[in-house]
Amino acid sequence: MDYFDRFAVPHPSFGIYASMVAIALTVIGIIVGITYYKKWGYLWREWLTTVDHKRIGIMYLISALLMLFRGGVDAILMRAQLAVPENTLLDAQHYNEIFTTHGIVMIIFMAMPFIMAFMNVVVPLQIGARDVAFPRLNALSFWLFFMGAMLLNISFVIGGSPDAGWSSYFPLASNEFSESVGTNYYMFALQISGLGTLMTGINFITTILKMRAPGMTLMKMPMFTWSALVTNIIIVFAFPVLTVALLMGSMDRLFATNFFTTSNGGMDMLWANLFWVWGHPEVYILVLPAFGIYSEVISTFARRNLYGYKSMVASMVIISLLSFLVWTHHFFTMGQGALTNSIFSITTMAIAVPTGIKIFNWLFTLWRGKIVFTVPMLYSLGFIPIFTIGGVTGVMLGLSAADYQYHNTMFLVAHFHLVIIPGVVFAMLAGLTYYWPKMFGFMLNERIGKWAFWFISISTCVAFFPMFLSGLDGQARRMYTYSEATGFGFWNMVSFIGAMGLAVGFALIVYNVYYSARYASREIGSDPWDARSLEWATHNPVPAYNFAIVPHVASTEAFWDSKKKGHVLFPGDYAKIHMPNNSGVPFVMSSIFFVWGFSFVFGMWIPVILTTIGIFACMAHRSWEEDHGHYLSVEEIERTEEQLRGA
Amino acid sequence: MKIDHTVPLEYSTEENRIKIVGFWIFLGAEIMLFATLFASYFTLVERTGSGPAGSDIFDITPVLIETIVLLTSSFTIGLGIHAMRIGKLMAMLSFFAVTLALGAGFLGVEIYEFLHYIHVGAGLQTSAFTAILLTTLGTHGAHVTFGLFWGIMIVWQIKKRGLTPENANKSFIFSLYWHFLDVVWIFIFSFIYLKGMM
Amino acid sequence: MAKIWSLLILIFTTMTMMTGCDSKLAVLDPKGPQAATQAHDILLSIYIMSFIVIVVFGFLVYMLIKYRASKQREDYEPPHIEGSAVVEAICVGIPVLIVIYLSIVSVQSNYKVEATPQGYEDKAPLIIYASSSNWKWHFSYPEEGIETVNYLYIPTDRALEFKLYSYGPITSFWIPQLGGQKYAMSDMVTTLHLAADVPGEYMGRNANFNGRGFAENTFHVQAMSEAEFAEWIKEVKETAEPLTEETFEALLAPGHVGQETFTGTHLEFSPAPEGENSGHDHGGKDSADHSQPTLHH
């Protein structure tokens, strides 16, 4: 291929050219807008260089919502293409690129930052800390994730999107069968954002282990913090596996090694094994924090403490262990024999037990409660039935002999969407509504929120239930079209209608944000939901130092007990507070990482060397820097507190 | 900054204690990284394609030199940290310098070893076995290289700024890293070289 | 509550359609013993799972009706309840029993689908090498000395033993009505045991995504009586061209071709990857033991 040909999109179409123009116009618009309103300084000082966990959380949230839009458009294109037999909306190559990016974007660049957003905003507040253990590392985590996401997203206008499925099985993903640079983007985008995720894991474990408020023993931590702890432990143990797999995959593509090739001893199954040794725990990385959010929301709006706290914790720990022992169920059909399949079949079904405990504990939390149907609660209650259906079909898939029939079919697609959408997306929407006042100081409109909920939950069922049937009728996943004779048409049309309903639901959420930003009251006090844990014991929105006085904790529901039993949460007087300084290094270093990844994608070795030197220079700079943070004086704290209380 | 004088300098501030915990967790991730490489190595070790097997290319002499050099460096950095704790700055810096010199020596022999492999027709592209062999060794080697730069930074900073709680913390964390690389090497030595030569 | 009920109705209609009214769903309309085993497991698990779903739905509806705020006194203050060892033990115990029962079913079925189909043990199975290339299926009948492309004729009186491998990306050989799928890979041969009980036409396809031509990567299956099968073999031997190395190489080039028939098989000049790097056969007829995960040592 001619050198510059690689930068061209291999399969251009009107849609891609239109996207290029749209992207260019948006970027120009943003730059002009910021310049016109003279906001560059503000942007740099308050956001690009911030190390404040709450702001980083908000940036994660914005990225997640943008990526949700991107992944959602992909989803609608797919459902539209399949809505009728022999459709010509998309050709095979486009369809392949779209379902590949849909998977990557939704898992890695939508769900992950969404949970990171809530972990960042909520965990330090719930444990009564001033920030995370390593604030600057936290900023670096975010920017690495963000640059990884951007790297993947430019692929569809420069060089072509990855097209080998989000699991990128070799040898399909090798140079031989996937010629464009798309899969290189996959390798480096995931690698860069994966590094960020690993750093988050280390950061939050340390934060939760070392920075809890006095009196908060491990077994007095709020459930979301527990879920964050378990999740981050999984991250630390699972992500290095992905790092190695991506390293080997990149070497196969760029340096012609033979890890996963079809010759010289290469072993395609090794990629599949490594991918899923990371990939299955990844599912729990997403779903456990979601469970944490449900625990908070359900107990808040049932006006009761969480039932079975200890078994909730135990079940999460057991799930985290089992999550590493089931990866083979992603390829029961690889021919590893009846014995191996039997073992992994049993471990897979065993996960239903701890998950079942959690479901029953949530149900018993409702027992003798006083249930208020707010929007976050609706999502949490809608989650239970839909997730149960998704979950029990997972047990069905765990029957390995039967899995020979489900594998690679729409049945599987129905299963994991009915687990991930109620299990993760509903939780994120519940969390979004629940923590919105915490982040932005006003509430989202309940009426519009309820409409959105009904659209989303009903559409989820309409979109994905038919796939169980078409799967059992023999519709394989990832087919870009099918013939009239197969009879899949009706079910796919129903799915398409469901997908449109989901689009309406999400559009309503966007409208709700606009509407509430304009009309909602800013006078919401510090505890608009009558909540139970520490994050509601400070102001809305939260001052930079979180708590003027470090709280003292005596129970799992410290804030609730302070309200009901007169427990003193903030003993003592104001003292000066040590705060970390902002730093531009994480942003600069991650930007260099972006160029580094881009250079690797196209095998441009001189920029690779230069950027590598740049990355090390940033690290050296950090090593030499003497940054001891700064102190907020008592007067400053008093002034801020007064202002917030007055407002 | 509150300094607690009842504990060693590297633990003396809250920030220092947190950094040490964080680094231990990072080492947990590193264990998974090398465990994955080892697992892949064992999976691919017999898949030599048309290339040589381990027993055809392994040469005991450089491997023994590497092992002795690296084990000694792990010992000297231990002495360095001991010297730091009893406040002997010169001794500490000398032991660190010896450690880094031994690290550089290790790296030199490893580069020679790699050239030898390429010379006998066991390059990165030869087979799945050679690829995973060179990647596993290379990942360890890259860690040692990174450690060298890191160590030089620390020695330089201590020379310039004296032994502050911050420097002591960095030195201690660096020693954990260096010991860890030594442990990984022991696994490489036993399960890649010795097993491969038998 | 409307939501819960609409959900319930949806579930029930789905289930009745799966199990009753519309029994034409391919997987639940088995035409061979392996598919029958799998359909049995699927239906069994649907019944057990619907029980669980109904229990959860029942609890949820009960809680929502009984404990909604609008039904409570204004000053009602929900109590603090820690949890109960007995209740939680039941919540663990019943799922454990269900999982144990399903595990037994699962293990039994695993050994069934990985062996010669029941009722067909008396005759030696017909061995067919099914190999995929982008985006075709090549079927070699080594005993009969013929080869077909994109279509498969099979007798109903004998068990079928498919030897699967791929000239390229991983594919998955699947004939839903005869039994579940298995991967075909480039560096090893996997074995899939099937049998057809009744003559008929069935859909077969590659189920594992393998690039641009994936959607059309299908093949046609025709099951027939022993006599008809013998007749077909004879006819092919008399009329078809021999398969040469050049013809086969040309066939491997990426693209789609129609149905083709040859005498001789490609196994003679391009043998299946059954060598040292594949199936060491540690017990069991299934090859591929070396692909057992060697991670997590």
Image (tube, coloured by chain):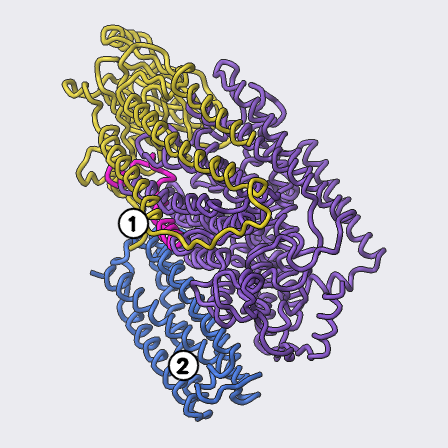
Q: Quick one: A152 or A471, which is closer to the camera?
A: A471
Between the C-alphas of marks 2 and 1, the distance is 36 Å
For residue B99, the mark is 2
Is residue C278 something one can see in this rendering? no
Residue A120 as seen in the image, left or right of residue A279: right
Q: Please tell me in which quadrant of the rendered image residue A626 appears.
A: bottom right
> Which residue is the extreme one toward the left?
C122
Q: Is residue A51 above or below residue C17?
A: below
Indicate the chain on which mark 2 is placed.
Answer: B
Q: Colour of chain C?
A: yellow
Q: Is residue A412 above or below residue A523?
A: above
Residue at numbered disc 1: C294
User: Which residues fall within the magenta stretch?
Assistant: A314-342
The reply to whether the magenta stretch includes residue A100 is no
Residue at 72 percent across and 76 percent down: it is: A636
Residue C139 percent location from the top left of the image: 33, 21
Q: Colour of chain B?
A: blue
Q: Is residue C248 above or below residue C273?
A: above
Amino acid type at image mark 1: Thr
What secondary structure is found at the residue carrying circle 1? Answer: loop
Residue at 69 percent across and 39 percent down: it is: A448
Q: Disc 2 or disc 1, which is closer to the eye?
A: 1
> Which residue is the extreme one toward the right?
A36
Figure label count: 2
Q: Colour of chain A?
A: purple
